[in-house]
Structures are given as C-alpha cells and as structure tokens.
Image (cartoon, grey):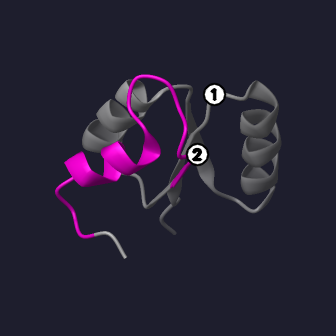
Amino acid sequence: MKEEKILVIDDDDDILKITQLNLEKLGYRVLLSRNGDDGFQKIQMVKPDLVITDFMVPKMSGIEIFKKDKRKIS
C-alpha cells in the first residue's frame, strides 16, 4: 500500500505540530515547511499527494506557491 505524502506549509509551529500529529494518526507521511520558498522546493522534489498551506507565509505566499507550480490544481 502506497503511503500518501502531505506537505503542510505554515509559519505557526503550533499549527504545524497539531496538523502533523492528526494526519500521522490517520496514516499519512507528513512533511513540514515554515516558509513558502522551502515549501515550493519540497513540492518540486518530493511531489506530495496533497499540499496544505496558509496563505500568509514568509518568503512566498500560499497563492504564489500554487501559481508557480505547473501541475494542475483542483
């Protein structure tokens, strides 16, 4: 069975920890990023199955991340 990867991008450590804990309980592999630049790099390298991002993160906003990503977003 394939382990699905979820990338969470947020600059609030409490939100990252809570989200990570809950998603891991559900069996997902969770990757974390604290800013948009790092998050975008992880999207390109790891190709997560899902990205959860705050709109207002340092270095590149959540919206800018998705505008830069060439994959179809739905």
Let me know if residue 56 is in the magenta part: yes
Asked whether 20 or 24 is in front, the reply is 20
Dot 2 falls on a residue whose secondary structure is loop
Q: CA distance from mark 1 to mark 2?
A: 8 Å
Q: Residue at x 63, y 56 (%)?
A: 28
User: 18 left or right of 34?
Assistant: right
Q: Amino acid at mark 2?
A: Asp
User: 8 left or right of 67?
Assistant: right
Which residue has dot 1 on it? Answer: 11
Q: Residue at x 59, y 48 (%)?
A: 29
Dot 1 falls on a residue whose secondary structure is loop
Disc 1 residue crowd, few under 14, some 14–19, many 20+, Cα 10 Å:
some
- Farthest residue, direction bottom: 74
Q: Residue at x 78, y 35 (%)?
A: 17
Whether pointer 1 and pointer 2 mark residues with C-beta atoms closer than 8 Å, the reply is: yes
Up the image or down, 44 lies above or below 24; here it is: above
Asked whether 27 or 67 is in front, the reply is 67
Q: In this picture, which residue range is highlighted in magenta?
A: 52-72
Which residue has dot 2 on it? Answer: 54
Q: Earlier in the sequence, mark 1 or mark 2?
A: 1
Question: Which percent across, then down, holds residue 41?
Answer: 30, 31
